[in-house]
Image: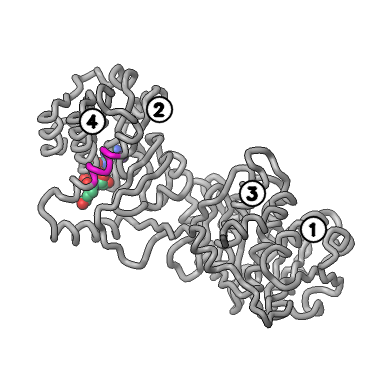
Amino acid sequence: MRTAYSVETVRTAERELMARLPGGALMQRAAAGLAAACADLLGRVYGRRVVLLVGSGDNGGDALYAGARLARRGAGVAAVLLAPGHTHPGGLAALRAAGGTVAAPGAAEDLIDRADLVVDGIVGIGGSGGLRPGATPLAARAAGSRAAVVAVDLPSGVEADTGEVRGAAVRADLTVTFGTHKPALLVDPAREYAGTVRLVDIGLDLPSGAALEALQHADVAALLPRPAAESDKYRRGVVGIAAGSARYPGAAVLAVSGALRGGAGAVRYVGPAGQAVIARFPETLVSDRGPHRAGRVQAWVVGPGAGDDADTVAEVLAEDVPVLIDADGLRLADPGAVRARTAPTLMTPHAGEAAALLGVAREEVEEARLSSVRELAARYGATVLLKGSTTLVAAADGGPVRVNPTGTPWLATAGSGDVLSGLAGSLLAAGLPALDAGSVAAYLHGLAGRFASDGAPAGAHDVAEAIPEAWRDVRD
Ligand SMILES: NC(=O)C1=CN([C@@H]2O[C@H](COP(=O)(O)OP(=O)(O)OC[C@H]3O[C@@H](n4cnc5c(N)ncnc54)[C@H](O)[C@@H]3O)[C@@H](O)[C@H]2O)[C@@H](O)CC1
Ligand SMILES: [K+]
């Protein structure tokens, strides 16, 4: 499991560790890891040109000490001091002692243009707001130059705890982060500024309460439902799909296609698209008698392509089994009825649907994905999966938010969400708790999207067909 911790938790862990170590030891560990990463990126250090962008705090100190290490290996290192007079004194002395220089006022742009590497030590976890006006043109110059850009701890200008970007920020090719990931390195939009992320262990002891968790193959493998020898279809779980309409029969077919590959023993379809569903998937149990009288299910999916069928949504919400609400269902569901449920509820909005539920503009959700998903989960007393390039899953009672690392932009295709809702519903029916069902589904779905597209456009049905391959890839 990959985890990310809040700045407050990192600060506490750093204080505890620093109290046990000689002064400056932590910064030396950070600088050593940073210098090693820079050297790897450069290939050869001797004779390379390195520019350090140095802010007023310890983030700049890391850059200066790492610059000193590179200078000792023969790089030409120049520091651009953004807050002269507030520069880390030990770091500056170390750089000078190693043969590094301080850039003359006005020389920064030229140095950046000729550099092989620019190290962003402007601001780290002590930062807030976007880049200050003095730093903005330098960051832009670095982005436009041929130099590789390495961010120290975080790309300067992003909000460490939220992943928000409230102004100009550095765009890095590589971010070297210390002790633990910070939320901004895993959540969009900040994640896109970080480039590749390399974690340097500095010996921090972190508590169990991470802000974010990202499942990896082994975590997902441990959560996948496995039929036991004595399983029959009912013990493996039956998932009910109440989706599709005369206008949108495809949504029903796609939700069923995801559900059939999600581990439930059977898929029951209820709605007006039974003919289309059975034609494509003859193994589906089709009923036109409404959710209450459809027969036993262990979890429901309601909403994909539902049009304006509010009655079916209300009927499903009244069932005392886990319910996944997606697409039209999110609009049609009575918030009071959702909050009143005692069985688990999983809501799966994209940013636009989440914005409508929160009563804000779509951009506000896209800019503040982490706080939006937490807010929705708290408001509805439900687990909420916010779809996007980094899909987030938050439980109603707080706790770590799951962030999905497998997404691909190719998944932004019509019907892809219907496949995801069927898959997650199937995992709910197989007995996974809502947070696990949502995050495992997002993981498999992302992987399936990668396999299906393999660098080329793919349709939602291709994604569904690639789910077994994703499942095998995770399990093996
Ligand atoms: N605390 C520790 O034990 C360690 C800290 N390390 C480094 O220290 C960093 C944190 O250092 P600091 O607490 O000194 O904080 P920073 O260096 O992140 O920021 C320092 C100062 O920058 C100013 N600032 C805030 N927002 C800004 C912005 N948007 N643009 C420009 N300036 C801004 C503020 O005055 C702030 O106090 C970490 O990110 C990491 O790089 C590492 O050396 C590892 C050990
Ligand atoms: K930085």
For residue 225, side relative to residue 182 (left or right)? right
The quarter of the displayed image where residue 226 is located: bottom right
Quick one: SS at disc 2?
Answer: helix
Question: How far from the left and from the top, in percent, is residue 193?
Answer: 43, 39
Of labels 2 and 1, earlier in sequence is: 2
Distance between mark 1 and mark 4 Cα atoms: 58 Å
Answer whether labels 1 and 3 touch (C-beta < 8 Å): no
Would you say the beta carbon of the disc 4 residue lies within 8 angstroms of ligand 1? yes
Name the residue: 40% across, 58% down: 3
What are the residue bounds of the magenta stretch?
30-36
Q: CA distance from mark 3 to mark 4?
A: 44 Å
**Is disc 2 in contact with disc 1, using a CB cutoff of under 8 Å?**
no
Q: Which residue is mark 3?
A: 449
Identify residue type, mark 1.
Val
Query: Crowding at label 3, few (<14), some or many (≥20) Cα neighbours within 10 Å?
Result: many
Q: Quadrant of ligand 1?
A: top left
Reading the chain from its start, which is encountered first: label 3 or label 4? 4
Q: Secondary structure at mark 4?
A: loop
Q: Amino acid at mark 2?
A: Ala
Image height check: is 304 above or below 62? below
- The reply to whether residue 435 is visible in this rendering is no
On the image, the x and y values in percent for residue 332 come to 70, 63
Please name the residue shown 25% across and 25% down the image: 46
Q: Which residue is mark 4?
A: 82
Q: Measured along the vertical axis of the image, is residue 351 above or below residue 211?
A: above
Tell me the residue that label 1 is attached to. 253
**Quadrant of the rendered image containing residue 36:** top left
Q: Give percent across and percent down for residue 167.
A: 40, 37
The one of 180 and 337 positioned closer to us in this rendering: 180
**N-terminal label among 2 and 4:** 4
